Amino acid sequence: MGTEHLSKMRTKEIFKQFGDHISKGQIRYLSAGHLDILEKNRRDTKFSDATTGKTYFDGFSSAGSFNTGRRNTRVVEALCDALNEYDMGTPLLLSRSKIEFARKLVDLAPGDLNKVVFTGSGADSIEAAIKLAKGATGREEIISMDKAYHGHSGFSLSAGGKDYYKELFQPLMPGFHLAPFGDLEAIRQLASMKTAAILIEPIQGEGGIHVGTSEYLQGLRQLCDNLGIVLIFDEIQTGFGRTGRIWFSEYSGVVPDVMALAKSIGGGVYPNGAIVYRDIPELTEFVNENPFFHTSSGGGSNIGCRVSSEVIDELVEKQLWKKAEKMGKRLKNGLTEIMLQHPESIIEVRGKGLMIGIEYRHEFMGMLMADSLSKSHIFAAYSGNAPQVMRFMLPLTVTEEEIDDFLTKFRKAMTIQGYYLFILLPLIKIPIFRKWMNDPKNLIPISAFLRKFGF
Ligand SMILES: Cc1ncc(COP(=O)(O)O)c(C=O)c1O
């Protein structure tokens, strides 16, 4: 890892090339929020910008992909070993790394979930889970939640709860119904003998960190049992220790029929995914009769399985979920104190473990705060389906000192945001201006304009 910085000229050229060949829109969006960073020197909870050399806290962890820390030494070594020994392998054939990973995964999984289907990503896990539910029950309908995010592929997009991502691609898959998150009665109204699955993130991530209560999740379990519906938990963000337990489902004691996993399962260095499901005749017989119902060249690759086995060992030996619980409390307490000092900006701090959301008073504040945080050297992202909610999902390896430093930087960002709000708060009392400000399409050109003048 070099420490030399890139020249401004070189960086400009790289961004231009990115714009020319990948997306000018993305460059516009990132520049507007001071997020035009070239990641370098990734380690544990931080990375630096190749141009400025500034070190940033990774407050986002690619939405929970870096639970074991960025470039965890042990995980990186496992990847190097795997590369020396294997290639991706043939999906059709068996290998020791696949079996070892599957065994470790089912040992860790809740309740009687002890069967695995390998996948290549989070969206792919959702595809597999929905196909399993539809195939095994022979039913056509799926219930998912408003504001949910499950990925950008066919079934997963159809199950998503934000029109913005879906409206350009109509018609999507038939038979999908949305219910408000947390509203058991609404789901009771939608559920019937036609329902194959209820799909839920037990803490909604992109939807703005909404924590499913035990009562709600237990109610879903009961409903699924009564109607023979497959209960699918998407623990792609919440799994592997993120929320202070290995799985979020442990808080409620609810064992889903299928659990969808990805992200941190690959240790942030090699993409991988899986679904784990209960060994009950309805599901197991379907898979035995259709062993190739969900295969791909990348899912469960030999390299990915070797890396994921090491991630599980690291997680278990270091008991990282306990760290998530302790550090999460420290962070949440600190953020709550800040909220009490800034009622004009923050209305709620919520979440579990190191999956914490801060809800700002207005939608536009999410983008504004990403900008202020970046200036204070924290990289953070607001929720894609709820822009007024900033998500903090630090790597679970974070220390007490780092949490305190993070909070100091956060306070600095609040001061920066205070300057913006001094001008904006009187203006947003005018409803038409408030509506205009809350549309990111309007904010991007304004931010880009202000940036030219050094803001
Ligand atoms: C809850 C949840 N489900 C599914 C996905 C899709 O995962 P991937 O990006 O690996 O396809 C994501 C990604 O952010 C997610 O947060």
Image (spheres, rainbow, N blue to C red):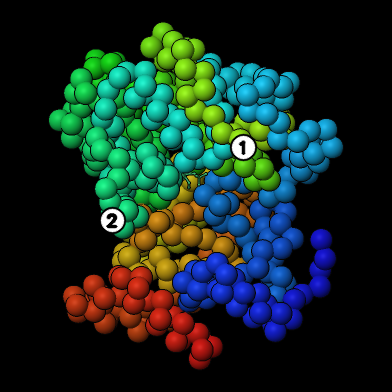
Q: Is residue 302 above or below residue 225?
A: below
Q: Is residue 187 left or right of residue 311?
A: left
Q: Position of residue 338 (x, y in %)?
A: 45, 61
Asked whether residue 84 appears in the rendered view, the answer is yes
Which label was assigned to residue 167?
2
Residue depicted at 20% across the width and 27% down the height: 191
Residue 199, by quadrant, is top left
| Residue 446 rendering spot, x and y as whole percentages | 40, 82
Q: What whole-number distance in Å separates the C-alpha atoms at marks 1 and 2?
A: 29 Å
**Vertical placement of 411 versus 297: above or below?**
below
Q: Amino acid at mark 1?
A: Gly
Q: Nearer the viewer, residue 336 or 144?
A: 144
User: Image quarter for residue 46?
Assistant: bottom right
**Mark 1 secondary-structure assignment:** loop
- Tell me if mark 1 has few (under 14), some (14-19) or many (20+) residues whose alpha carbon lies within 10 angstroms of its own: many
- Which residue is identified by label 1? 298
Q: Compared to 349, does 202 lie above or below?
A: above
Which is more toward the observer, 392 or 16? 16
Number of numbered discs on residues: 2
| Image location (x, y in percent) of residue 314 | 71, 33
- Residue at image location 24% in from the left, 17% down from the top: 227
Front residue (pair 447, 405): 447
* Residue at far top of view: 281
Q: Secondary structure at mark 2?
A: helix
- Among numbered discs 1 and 2, the one appearing first in the sequence: 2
